[in-house]
Amino acid sequence: MANSMTVRKGDKVRVIAGKDKGKEGKVLRSLPEKQRVVVENVAMMKKAVRPSQSNQQGGIIEMEGTIHVSNVMLICPSCSQPTRAGRRRDDGTRIRVCKKCGKDIDK
């Protein structure tokens, strides 16, 4: 399994499958070795935490869980449409390209 993903940290994505289908959010973390991403306000889960220096109270906190990268679709910053990302080489660096409008996704 390849460890390269077309979705990176900071990208805006739309969830296309699962219980949060249709939601949009920013990618907070990318885990290429597991082919998963953490998207803000998607796949929320509750976690019990013990009291600590930073969290004196402890208790149950709600946080984002991971979602498989195949269940999200990249939103192009130019055309604001969910799209697949193509790649092209520009003097040795790979640049992601929107398949719908043809513009560069990476600045």
Image (cartoon, grey):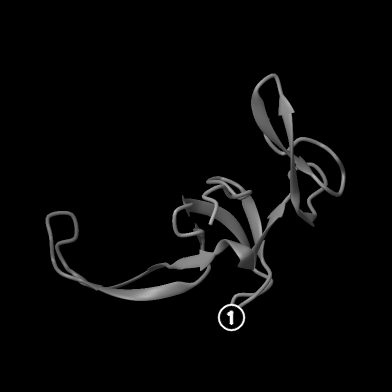
In front: 55, or 94? 94
In front: 78, or 93? 93
Vertical order, 93 against 78 (above or below): above
Farthest residue to the top: give it: 91
Residue 27: x and y in percent read 54, 53
Q: Which residue appears at 49% of the width and 72% of the height? A: 43
In front: 107, or 87? 87
Vertical order, 26 against 48 (above or below): above
- Mark count: 1
Quarter of the figure with the C terminus: top right
Q: Which residue appears at 65% of the width and 57% of the height? A: 13
Q: Is residue 39 visible?
A: no
Q: Looking at numbered disc 1 in the image, what kind of residue is underneath it? A: Lys
Farthest residue to the front: give it: 1
Q: Is residue 39 left or right of residue 46?
A: right
Q: Which residue appears at 63% of the width and 48% of the height? A: 6
Q: Is residue 99 visible?
A: yes
Would you call the spot at circle 1 few (<14 residues within 10 Å), some (14-19), or many (20 or more)?
few
Farthest residue to the right: give it: 101
Residue 24: x and y in percent read 64, 62
Which residue is the site of mark 1? 19
Residue 85: x and y in percent read 73, 48
Residue 38: x and y in percent read 48, 59
Q: Of helix, strand and loop, which one carries label 1?
A: loop
Q: Is residue 51 left or right of residue 45?
A: left
Vertical order, 62 against 97 (above or below): below
Farthest residue to the bottom: give it: 19
